[in-house]
Amino acid sequence: MTADRQELLRREEAAWSALLTAAERVPAELRTVAGVVPDWSVSDLVFHSGKYAELTGQRLEQMASGTFVDEEQPQEQWQAMNDGWAEESKSLTWEQSVAAAEACRAKARSALEALSEVDDTAASWFSDETFLHYAEHTDEIERFADST
């Protein structure tokens, strides 16, 4: 089955916009303060969301080149990536975090656009690691914004 590329891109754009709208509800001076989820700030979650989009872009590029191997990564590997990204994001300003995340999501979008066909595997990777992932963190950021 071929997924609707334009619908996936539209959903990614809308979810990204919602994530940033939620983040902007948090006072600027609190966006880099941990507490949205334990040890993570709004800035950390935006950067993290971007990094997952970038990872998706890499996977989609592998699909396009025929080098993609769909194998389950152990939880420890996912956690190590998350920990590394969290450490990296803590050294960034809010503006730097958003700019980096924007560049990362651009990679996912352009990789999806470059695929000759968007099959179920590509659509699933894109959906799971972009707009569905953004929505999870949007909810957390909105709760944090409501509490500030």
Image (cartoon, rainbow, N blue to C red):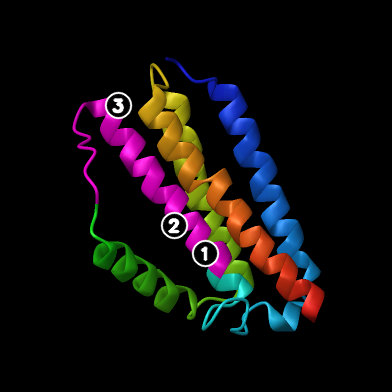
Residue name at image x 33 percent, y 43 percent: 58
Decide if residue 35 is on the left or right side of residue 72.
right
Dot 3 amino acid type: Ala
Mark 1 surroundings: few (<14), some (14-19) or many (≥20) residues within 10 A: many
Dot 2 amino acid type: Lys
Dot 1 amino acid type: Phe
Quickly name the residue at label 1: 47
Q: Residue 54: within the magenta? A: yes
Along the viewing direction, whichever of 27 and 139 lies nearer the viewer:
139
Quickly name the residue at label 3: 64
Residue 39 image point, x, y percent:
51, 83
Q: Is residue 104 above or below residue 107?
A: below
Q: Helix, strand or loop at disc 1?
A: helix
Quickly name the residue at label 2: 51
Residue name at image x 47 percent, y 26 percent: 113
Q: Is residue 104 above or below residue 12?
A: below
Q: Helix, strand or loop at disc 2?
A: helix
Q: Residue 59: within the magenta? A: yes
Q: Earlier in the sequence, mark 2 or mark 3?
A: 2
Magenta span dominant secondary structure: helix
Residue name at image x 24 percent, y 27 percent: 65
Along the viewing direction, whichever of 126 and 140 lies nearer the viewer:
140
The stretch of residues the image draws in magenta is: 45-72
Mark 3 surroundings: few (<14), some (14-19) or many (≥20) residues within 10 A: some
CB under 8 Å between discs 1 and 3 = no
Residue 147 image point, x, y percent:
78, 79
Mark number, residue 23: none
CB under 8 Å between discs 2 and 1 = yes
Q: Earlier in the sequence, mark 1 or mark 3?
A: 1
